[in-house]
Image (cartoon, coloured by chain):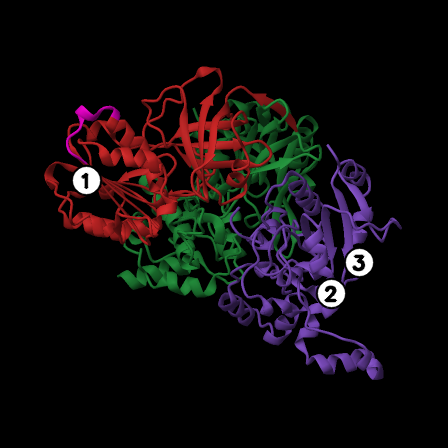
Amino acid sequence: MRKPKVAFFDFSSCEGCQLQVANFGEALLDILGLIDVVMFREAISEKSDDYDVAIIEGSITTSHDIERIKQIRATAKVLIAYGACATIGGINGMKNNFDLEDIKKYVYKDDAKYFESIPTHPLHQVVKVDYFVHGCPVYQPEFVKVLKCALAGLLYTVPDYAVCTECRFNENVCMYDKGITCMGPVTRAGCNSWCVNNGNICYGCRGMLSNPAQEGQMDILKKHNIALDWVQNKMNMYNKPRELDTEPPANNGHIG
Amino acid sequence: MQRFVILSKKDLDAFISALAQSQKVVAPVARGHNNFSFAEVSSGKEITLKYIPTILPPKKYFLPTQEIITSYNKRENALNAILEYEKMVIFGVHTCDLAGIQCLNMVFADKPKDINYIIRKNKIAIIGLECNDYCDEYASCHVVGNHLPNGGYDLFFTDLGDVFIVHINTMLGDELVNKAAVFKSADAKMLKALESLRQMKHSIFKDEVNVKHQELKPLFDRSSNSKVWEDLNKRCVACGNCTNVCPTCYCFDIIDEPNLDLNTGVRYRRWDSCQNEPFAKVAGNENFRKERSQRQRHRYMRKFKYPVDKYSRYFCTGCGRCSRTCMAQIKLKETINDLAKETQ
Amino acid sequence: MKRIELKESEYIVAPAKILEARMMTAQEKYFKIALEGGTSLDHEPGQFVMVSLLGIGEAPISISSSPTKRSYFELVVRNVGKVTNALHKMEAGDSLGIRGPFGRGFPVQILEGNDLLFVAGGLGVVPLRSLINFVIDNRRDFGKVHILLGCKKPADLLFANEIKEWGKRLDVNFNCTVDKADPDWKGNIGLITSLIPGVNLNPKRTFAVVVGPPIMYKFVLIEILKKEIPQKQIYVSLERHMKCGVGKCGHCQIAQYYCCKDGPVFSYDQIKGNLEAL
């Protein structure tokens, strides 16, 4: 059987998620036994327009991006949104907190007039996405899981329960017990509470649950004496573009 | 015949070290911020004897968070049932958690029997440890009758100051004691001391809620449409912590995980929670417990009503973990009192 | 950690082969399946199996055929998730695994000798067909038989040819309705509830068996109760997402019942009043 041709593309992003692939170590060899990487800017110089699977890092932030992603979608049989920028808009989404013209001037100063910019969109707001690999950066074991599903033609459903679940499985001391607030209770699991295992809080980089308990969360903040705007900032750090969602993206935390 | 022996406290280290030479020993260890967990130890020094209920109960050894149940080979269309187990001793199990294990035993021995659970359970030796006083204000062990030992252990340790008095409950327990050779026989004075400790506990441990033991089930029978659930709806964030830390919650999901060759792989089960939104969803997205209020009610009913109908036993052990872990500070004792107040 | 192979386990699957597969509607695919080695599934009408696809997972599927057909069984699968999606790509000759049959089916012995009112909405005809065909295959053992079917539109009708045959039978009172007709439809238009008042039955000796989507029960049961059929003589088959099939995993729990073990068939008398049941 012919190995599927896989191409990596990047839009607005830091390319750190692609770096995760390069950092795979030994498992990378197993993966390369299954696929034929035809385009991967971080590791190989070849370019190709002939691919089956497109793995996209980054969010859509210009109208040129829209044309380009539509082109890729038209070519690829399978499209994988890869990393927080692609799946939820991510850090780039913070731009949506501001007036577009103001923020352009702030970034580009006098040269602002040369740059075209639109509000940040995750991929699914522009094209159909077949698989979501959340995270900033992506969690490698989950990427492998998704890749296996993509190669076998199976659905992959992102967990629609809180990071807390995995965090309890790992028996981490709860951040709230330490008097620190954490986005775990409203953030989709699937990362094996990677950050908390390593002493960090959850920043919500995997996107929010499909039905987060806003009221309950506010109640918790009140009880723990945590300022609301501080949390809202934290929440919007990765999740601002969700305001532009018209409907929940398929396979992204629904029954499977 | 009841048999008791004595272990001098200074010999605990020798006992645990000797045990750990021949098999895995797990016991409560401190994790900081007044959190504890059962973890592998090689000596008594690593153990925290005075601990509040661990983050996860010992159920994690009986029903692992994730457990392979079958392995497969697609090309050969073959699927084999798998059991992974480990012989071990769990030291320092409080009476609430002993009760939790008893509840799980009932569920998994219920027909059709769960072979994986049954075999694994029989590879685990259990050493209980008595609570001479309440661990904290979250516990409600008296009202569910778990502040005193009710069996379910091989050995049971009670702290009498300089020594532990140890009840030998099974032949396996007897073997552990004989092998260690650090135990002495218990004299009448020690037995008397145990008795007076238990007497004293009667004055310390009192019903923690305004409802009597036998009134808990009727309370939940009439609380189906209580406003208390609506209140929980507003507070709960459905993180699932309460069920994951519960010693008697056993729900799981079954998931296939292919290897990278896409030919072989395993099917495993993994703890799941009725608090998670998709738990009771069916094809077509109908969700039978869509509201957090329904899911919280279901959790409570699964402790105080449904298992009583089925197994004549409360599945709340009074350990207090659900209240302790809840960020929204939904407290079991408070919920029960609120229900009682409302339906008086 | 020791790893051993178990000779017995509830999770072992029986190898099976697809004998026939075809799309029945735009969303539902029909499968005729036989266990390897010529073993009969030996199920009761109303039971279900776990269909197991290696590396993909398992899904609970109602058995649609009557146990009077010994050498094979039939399933009808709607494409709604990972497993059913993969199933839809499978064809005759493909292998799969079967666990079960599971659960309590329809109480055939209790129904015998009595008049029967069958009500099925949408996919509900799939499990109910196992009982209807059992009754038809043993027609003399039962009293009057009324069959009422309903679905959204004519194109959704499952087992259309077979249903046509039911309609032609002298020993069956058959009626069918669609929510929304197309130009070729000559039958009733309207909800299934509209068919019930017109059925001429003796409530004392009639047993009603109702199977349909969750939303349907509430309204159909009101109509059936109006007919004064005693609550003990009304049976429903409830849909839940069983994962283990053996009364452990908790997904299908309705109050103290596990739908996979204590159901999926319940008498109305038994299940009414239980939280989140109907």
Question: What hue does chain B carry in this figure?
Answer: green
Element carrying mark 1: helix
Residue denoted by label 2: A65
Element carrying mark 2: helix
Question: What hue does chain C carry in this figure?
Answer: red
Q: Quadrant of the N terminus of chain C?
A: top right
In the rendered structure, does residue A153 fall within the stretch colored magenta?
Answer: no
Instruction: Tell me if mark 2 has few (under 14), some (14-19) or many (20+) residues whose alpha carbon lies within 10 angstroms of its own.
Output: some
- Magenta region, residue range: C137-145
Front tag of 1 and 3: 3
Residue positioned most to the right:
A45
Q: Are marks 3 and 2 on the same chain?
A: yes
Front tag of 3 and 2: 2
* Chain shaded purple: A
Front residue of this view, candidates B25 and A42:
A42
Disc 1 to disc 3: CB gap under 8 Å: no
Amino acid bearing label 2: Asp
Question: Label 1 to label 2, Cα distance in Å?
Answer: 64 Å
Question: Label 3 to label 2, Cα distance in Å?
Answer: 16 Å
